[in-house]
Image: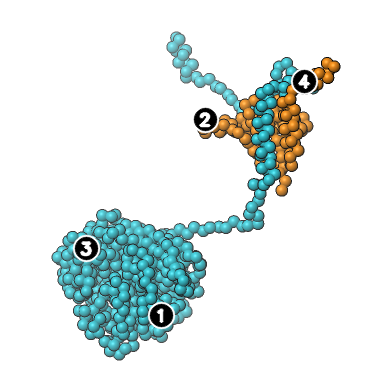
Chain colours: A orange, B cyan
Amino acid sequence: IATFLGRKLQPRPQNEVEETLKRIQGQKGVQGIIIVNAEGIPIKTTLDNSSTVQYAGLIHQLVMKARSTVRDIDPQNDLTFLRVRSKKNEIMIAPDKDYFLIVIQNPSD
Amino acid sequence: MFEGLLLHHEIIRQRFESETRVINHVEGGWPKDVNPQEMEQTVRFRKKVEKDKHYFSTMMQLGSNMEHSIKQNNAINIYQEYFEGEEEEVVEESKPSMFLNPNKIKHTATSLSWHPDGSRKLAVAYSSLEFLKVFKDISYNSDIWNIENRNKPEMTLKPVSPLVCLEYKPPKTLTSWSEIATMARSVAAYWDTRKEHSHRDPVYKVIWLQSKTGTDTFSASKDGQVLGWDIRKMSEPTERLVLDPNKKCNPDNALGVISLEFETTMTTTFMVGTEQGLLVSCNQKAKSPPEKIVCTYSGPTGPVYALQKNPFFLKNLTVADWKAHIWSEDIMWTNLQVCDEALYSQKVQDNGCFLACGHQGGRGRGERRGGRGRGERRGRGRGRGERRGGRGRGERRGGRRGGRGEAEEEERRGGRGERRGGRGERRGGRGRASAEEGEGERRGGPRRARERRGGRGRAPRRASAEEGEESAEQGAEGRGRGSAEEGEGEERRGGRGERRGGRGRGERRGGRGRGERRGASNAHLKKRSGRNKVLKGLSEQNKRFQNSFDINTFFTNPVSFSH
């Protein structure tokens, strides 16, 4: 019974986040999702570990740079979204103060 | 000691070496208590993070953002390759080339003429239209330029007195060309021995006659005479026509001739545009002088500076005075006011589609006459007239004065046959060369001859610049120029003689179809300054030959002044 109770008490927000991520993952062309925290630690990922770590590290630096650029130009401004389009795919980064959401998509024509 | 030590420290700088290194990020910044190698610890850490409330709210927000972008990407690919397979068009900017006159004192280029065989040579005549001024170092040279080489003229002509008008003769033979140069002060001066026969006023325009011998020319001047010459026998004009509206040969009533144009098909008839605004149609072959003047049209309201027969519709011609008129031979059927300022030159492009006008402000305009099937196109061109010597010089009439010196017209980009917008190059070195005029001169800067390279392609208009200055004061008038300078308004100065009338030569060079070059007449509109004394009493009504010189008494002797 204790375990049963334990399961029921699973917080609801958790579900919603999962659902959101599942939805994103289900979109056409999405290759992978990574959630990284401010220190660069990947919290959640759908890719393999080595890619995840690579993305996390590199993108973190990129976002920092982009954000500082935007703020240098106008201190009242802030970075809301970053898209890196390459030949093969597009890396979309939604930054926040504490976390980044990274999605790699291959927009198919 | 301490100070010494301190000093020592200051002088000897510490070296601080720095190096740039890149971090190879292998693992994120795990907290100290978590060992990244251990799976269990990392998983636990992650789960902990996931339970954070902040994490939840952030993720929801980021998630929705992200979803939006993803859907965007899927909806439309904004980065597609749009212009596959297209070649980049090279847009050539046509810059006006400037041929700098190497002389020290810059003269206005009073006439330009393209080499008839289609080569890229250009002959430029430099002169100073202030006839009465004497320059010490004035150079009489005129140059022939090859437009490939902008630094130095290819050949320099050194005539006796400055050339005012220069024309290439359409070759009758295959090889050679010749040119005839008419001197400015010249005609009177140069042939002073033949004073009886030559022009008394500076010759404004010389055109070649298409005759069998290929050696006939006509010259027209402000004294109202149109003289025909045979170049083999320059001592006397072969024929003479005095333009007198009353059909009498009274030289006192003759009208100053500014432009001259032949009808291309009939070599015996030509049109003469006068200072007073009359167009006179003359028949060359008429036996006696009074009969030569066949009829006169008195449409244009101002002095006719340029005249050109439409090469395609033979009965029509365009006339430039203060407006551009398009006339047909019998009636004036269109009157288009092209611009507000006086027009000095006109040119119709070879295919009849474009009409370019240059006027005193150094502006060129091209227009197309629409709708009539004429297809002349009018575009707007903008020439740049430089005012040399500033504004202060002389008067400028309402800003009309084109600058001396450069008047670049931009070639107009025509619709067809691209005419580059309004920019005509001024070739011939006039570029900067404007003669320094003395004060009080008014320099008008109408664009002078504008040459148009015909043909469909580019048709740059080259205007010869310069304006002749008219020194009003100088009594350039003195010479029979009926410049009515007096008073306000414009006076058209005949300028001393150089007025390059529109060159009526329909030369078609080679296959280029250069088209005719229209000389912009130079008459500047000058505003007479208060002390306009010159003018020999010639009012616009042209009493040409009065030697009433201005009070300046610079020139009392007509002959001598020309030198």
Q: Determine if marks 3 and 2 fall on one subunit.
A: no
> Gap in Å between the C-alphas at discs 1 and 2?
73 Å
* Chain letter of the residue beneath label 4 in the structure image: A
Going by the numbered disc 4, the residue's amino acid type is Leu
> Gap in Å between the C-alphas at discs 2 and 4?
43 Å
CB within 8 Å, label 1 to label 3: no
- What label does residue B488 carry, if any? 3
**Structural crowding at the residue carrying mark 3, measured as other residues with C-alpha within 10 Å and reported as few (<14), some (14–19) or many (≥20):** some
> Gap in Å between the C-alphas at discs 4 and 3?
103 Å
Q: Is residue A4 visible?
A: yes
- What label does residue A75 carry, if any? 2
Question: Closer to the camera: disc 2 or disc 4?
Answer: 4
**Structural crowding at the residue carrying mark 1, measured as other residues with C-alpha within 10 Å and reported as few (<14), some (14–19) or many (≥20):** few
* Chain letter of the residue beneath label 2 in the structure image: A
In this rendering, position of residue B412 left or right of residue B490 = right
> Gap in Å between the C-alphas at discs 1 and 3?
36 Å
Going by the numbered disc 1, the residue's amino acid type is Lys
Task: Count numbered badges in the picture.
Answer: 4
Element carrying mark 3 = loop
Q: Earlier in the sequence, mark 2 or mark 4?
A: 4
Question: Closer to the camera: disc 4 or disc 1?
Answer: 4
The residue beneath circle 4 is A9
The residue beneath circle 1 is B315
Find residue B249 and report its image quarter.
bottom left
Q: Determine if marks 4 and 3 fall on one subunit.
A: no
In this rendering, position of residue B11 left or right of residue B43 = left
